[in-house]
Amino acid sequence: DADVTQTPRNRITKTGKRIMLECSQTKGHDRMYWYRQDPGLGLRLIYYSFDVKDINKGEISDGYSVSRQAQAKFSLSLESAIPNQTALYFCATSDSTAYGYTFGSGTRLTVV
Amino acid sequence: GENVEQHPSTLSVQEGDSAVIKCTYSDSASNYFPWYKQELGKRPQLIIDIRSNVGEKKDQRIAVTLNKTAKHFSLHITETQPEDSAVYFCAASRPPGGQNFVFGPGTRLSVLP
């Protein structure tokens, strides 16, 4: 089945380390997104990309960067992780109509 | 920019009763309103959506209503079952080719047996 895959599923890292979260999709969607989920705050947009040459900041992009390596791949990097970046991170995709996202299974990141 | 509020933050109902979750949005240009269900430890999944050209949409036990004038929309679940227990998120956006979804903070629904 076409799906959105995130790796790793869980990660514990130390403050100051660089870490990359990866997302790949087989849905053939053009648009890809990275969201962060914190209890009581819902899902907040970090970065989004409408195609390979398009990268846009979301509402909480500080401390993060992204790379759209191909239509099917969108990576999120934390250049120097800090404890308040501990959260559940979701990748999502949509087609050009943007009616409805498909979410990945999430990456739980803990920064100690 | 768009701001989406959602109430209540937690909701407990007895099995078989109805549940209603309400969201308000601020951007009058928003025209698409999906609802996502997130079970514990799982990804959010789309359960129903509504576009601004209709006022109500039903799918079996769930329905969504939209009041564009008041800029609010609601999720209604009837005959609740234990498997309805989850966190529900509303969202608003302006596709196609428009802005991205802005999500509400979520409602944790517990259906008590």
Image (spheres, helix red, strand yellow):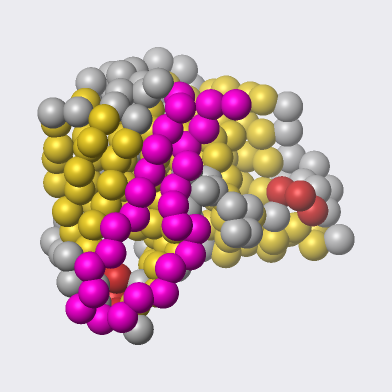
> Could you tell me which residue is drawn at 35 percent across and 84 percent down?
A112
Residue in the foreground of this view, choosing between B56 and A64: A64
Residue in the foreground of this view, choosing between A107 and B113: A107
Check the image and name the residue furthest to the right: B113
> Could you tell me which residue is drawn at 29 percent across and 40 percent down?
A74
> Could you tell me which residue is drawn at 14 percent across and 61 percent down?
A62
Q: Position of residue B36 (x, y in %)?
A: 52, 42
Residue in the foreground of this view, choosing between B105 and B21: B105
Please give left or right for residue B10 compared with residue A110 in the image: right
Whether B58 is drawn above or below A107: the answer is: above
In this picture, which residue range is highlighted in magenta? A1-27
Residue B56: image quadrant is: top right
Magenta run includes residue A16? yes
Q: Where is residue A57 in the image (x, y as percent from the top left)?
A: 15, 46
Magenta run includes residue A31? no
> Could you tell me which residue is drawn at 34 percent across and 30 percent down?
A72
Residue B85: image quadrant is: bottom right
Residue in the foreground of this view, choosing between A104 and B29: A104
Residue B79 in sight: yes
Whether B79 is drawn above or below A46: the answer is: above
Residue A44 in sight: no
Looking at the rendered structure, the number of numbered marks drawn on it comes to 0
Quadrant location of the N terminus of chain B? top left
Quadrant location of the C terminus of chain B? bottom right
